Image (spheres, grey):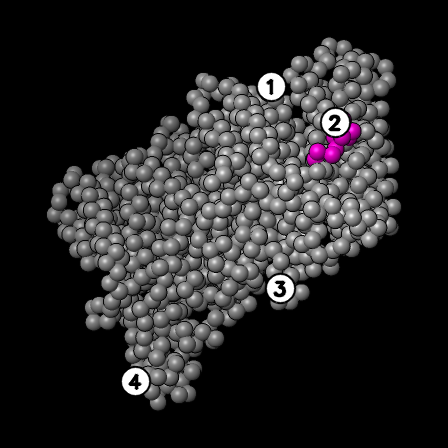
Amino acid sequence: MLILFVAAMIAVLVEAFVPRVQRFITQVVLATVGIAASLIFVIYLAVEDTSKLTAGGAVAIDGPALFLQGTILVLGLLAVLTIADEAPESGAFTSQASAVPGSMDEARAARAGLVQTEIYPLILFSMVGMLLFPASNDLLTMFIALEVLSLPLYLLCGLARRRRLLSQEASMKYFLLGAYSSAFFLFGSALLYGFAGSVRLSAISEAITGNSTTAASAVVGKDGLLLLGIGLVAVGLLFKVGAFPFQSWTPDVYQGAPTPVTGFMAACTKVAAFGALLRIAYVAIPGARWDWQPAIWLVAALTMLVGSIIAIVQADVKRMLAYSSIAHAGFILVGLVAMDKDGVGSVLFYLAAYGFTTIGAFALVTLVRTSTPEGGVGGEATHLSQWQGLGKRSPLLAAVFTLFLLAFAGIPLTSGFTGKFAVFSAAVDQAPWGVGLVLVGVAASSIAVFFYIRVIVLMYFNDSVGDAVTVTRPGALTIFAVGVGVVATIGLGILPSAALGLANSSSVFLP
Amino acid sequence: MDFPWLTVIGAVPLAGSAAIAVLPKAAASRAKLVALGVSLVALVLTVVAATQFETSRAGEIQLSQVHSWIGEFGVSYAVGVNGIGLVMIALSAVLVPLCVLAAWNEVDDEKARLFFGLVMVLEAMMIGVFAARDLFLFYVFFEAMLIPVYFLIGTFGGNEQRRRYAAVKFLIYSLAGGLVMLVGVIALYAAGPGGEQGFLIDNLTGLDFSSSAAERLMFVAFFIAFAIKAPMWPVHTWLPDAAAEAPSGVAVLLVGVLDKVGTFGMLTLCLPLFPQASRWAAPVVLALAVTSVLYGALLAIGQTDLKRLIAYTSISHFGFIVLGIFAMTSTGQSGSTLYMVNHGFSTAALFLVAGFLINRRGSADIDEYGGLQRSTPVLAAGFLLAGLSSLALPGMSSFVSEFMVLTGTFIKYPGAAVVATAGMVLAALYILLTYQRMFTGPKKEFASGWKDASAREVWVVAPLIAVIIFMGIYPKPVLDVINPAVSTTMQQVGVTDPSATVTADTVEGENK
């Protein structure tokens, strides 16, 4: 984490001092090496198996934290690769974020061939926040992590090259709503502090169970503080994972953001946010579970249903994937409700499985472009009607995208199925009314199948729309990212044993 | 360690599909050769495996293999067959090469790799589903086999709008059923012993359920999935669409083999896993089955589309199969199992001949045909023989099985048997009427240039006709394999045969 932080700092300096010509390559190398180095360190820690509290007890380095950090780093690496692979003349990013859409400034920047490189420090900072988020052991650290991960994301969302207004609107919307949710989180933390006399998660837990040393007698009669606090903190976290009823930003932001960033956001943010949610649920407030479990039960059920049902009417690939990610947030919550070791393991596994598929899917979306009248490469063709007949024109892309869609839909022999199975079986085993929740999940899955299948139908069984859409040749880095996605999707589907074992053995939180 | 026959039989077509996938574009036309060769190898292997199968112990699971697969979930890779599974695998192994041969000229070279590759994947999945002895593995094959069929119907079907509709309808129905079953699968695992091999069917058989309500709910979850697959009235509506739009070779596999997974599942999963609930549900299931028999037959009479007609006759026949299974007599269940095989062959023959005719005429509308007996006597004869088998004429294979089903049902539920017998009469009506409309009468103008069956077409249909007649006259070898397996199932369900009181020693003899 520190390595990455240093890398991010250096990246800012690079932005300031390295001449423009060399900036791009320096940034890419720096980001890649930084992420890779932290990944190696995380693996080292995991192998050493030194679970401990560090930074004055504010950060917990335990199984789930390391697993999630590893996942975030791998996914982030893939995301950076897809971002770096953008050809400057057709890339997804604007050349100058400050330029007003359609203005002279923008035209001039484009002519000058400016290339955006502040993306990389932004991504690195965001990842620092993401790494800290699931590892933070008190509410204040968690809040800082939340802000560190969110603020760069707000900016990244506004950097799309085409459809600038949509992109800037997305950025604005994300920022405003994100700020509200952070405020809720902070307010909730304050209430929990009022309840327990400490922001340390373990102290809150002790206060709930009643053997607290800090505020033993003080907690009596403060149930209101506790419940309200849990509720408000949950609002902040559920917002980040995109769960109902705090999901409304997801489709707009996913659609507006530059697609590589969407992939990064969808995969990594979800992992980090669920990590934090898990930690709060398992470390801080397990004692009050009878109070909040029914609420999460309901949230999970509604999230699955809302995500699946609204996705049916979407006509834009990115919006559809956004609603699909909402539905998946619901599925992951099913695992959370289980509240035991299997539940944690299943959530960890699901996050990894979902992340790989998502990065791959969004990387593919960046390849499908409209054609300009002169035969050049235009913006991304995200409207579903533009995807018609893709199976005939670029069979490989369509086949890989089909694989990802089938994984999202949870068809056996893909990672999506294994993940779904893991959370469902954990819930049936452990959760109160788990069978009911799984029934809702199954209903939502079968609804969801419908719209994934619709895209497959469009790609394969419809006639092509002609020359209006081109498929750009992916660069080597994108191919690598997609390839990893494919391998992970199939591998976790057919031979998930190793990953499941890893997830299960990393599923114990430090108190 | 014994030779892993079942794994190899399943792996061969899978390897074949991989080989087809890597064929260079220029050699795409070789795909069918590879497919034919591979499916013949699988057939030979099946025959060899069948010789390793000890008929005297046909009630037990043989040729089995168990390896841990996903230990965290309690999932094993476990395959093995008893008599019922063996004949179903044999059925698949026989039909696939014929379907490949039937599609020989139907698919243009450009798409040949996709078509034959998918057919090979499908064969592997079918063998897997019949061989799986782990519930999770069964479920995986059960769902995974939908994907190749979906693409086969959607890409190679008839009319563009309708084939897409049919493919999606097929997939949605099957997946919905499958997901309901998934809940049952998970619930059953939770009720079972758990652990590393918690999904092994053997470990889940004979469980003592805490409440009969739980058992009944699980039974219903499984049954819904199998009823959709089978397909039974009222969840049958996907079949006519899918079968009518699919290329005839695929329709054969769909109706001849895939749908059997439904009845196979009822017989080998629903009954042994949920014996109490099965007995509880039997009256309702029988009512549904009888409805299917009559409803399918009546709608078949009214069809104008040849392939839809055959699809509806299948719904009627599946009604008989379910009837025999849930009548819970050994005669009925043996009859049903035999029926599954026979129906596979006779429907395959019907679909294939129909496919040849439709290729010539370019339409599946029955009214567009007429007097074909004079221009294509061999095809007409093929259709008639297959049809006669389908209507269960004595001497044809289906007769034996239909007779066993009806007598088996009559022992316990005479009412149901009597009503279902009407289905036989209706069967005569739809087959003979169709034959009359298509083949009799004066020679038609449009058919003057038609060639009669080509050598390839004869090679496709002749083996089927031979099997149909052979099984009609001498079904004993197959029954010998089926009967012990059925007796085992009967014991697991815990029902005694009503006929046992009369012929106690014969039943005793069978059980040994």
Q: Do tags 4 and 3 sit on the same chain?
A: no
Q: Main secondary structure of the magenta part?
A: helix
At numbered mark 3, what does the secondary structure look like: helix, strand or loop? loop
Disc 2 to disc 3: CB gap under 8 Å: no
Label 1: element kind: loop
- Comparing labels 4 and 3, the label whose residue is closer to the camera: 3
Instruction: Mark 3: give few (<14), some (14-19) or many (20+) Cα within 10 Å.
Output: some
What kind of residue is marked 3?
A: Phe
Pointer 2 and pointer 3 on the same chain: yes
- Left or right, B175 with respect to A365, comes to right
Q: Image quadrant of residue A199? A: bottom left
Which residue is depicted at the point 37% across and 51% down?
Answer: A499
Residue designated by label 2: B470
Mark 2 vs mark 3, foreground winner is: 2
Q: Total marks drawn?
A: 4
Against A58, is B396 above or below? above
Image disc number at residue B105:
1
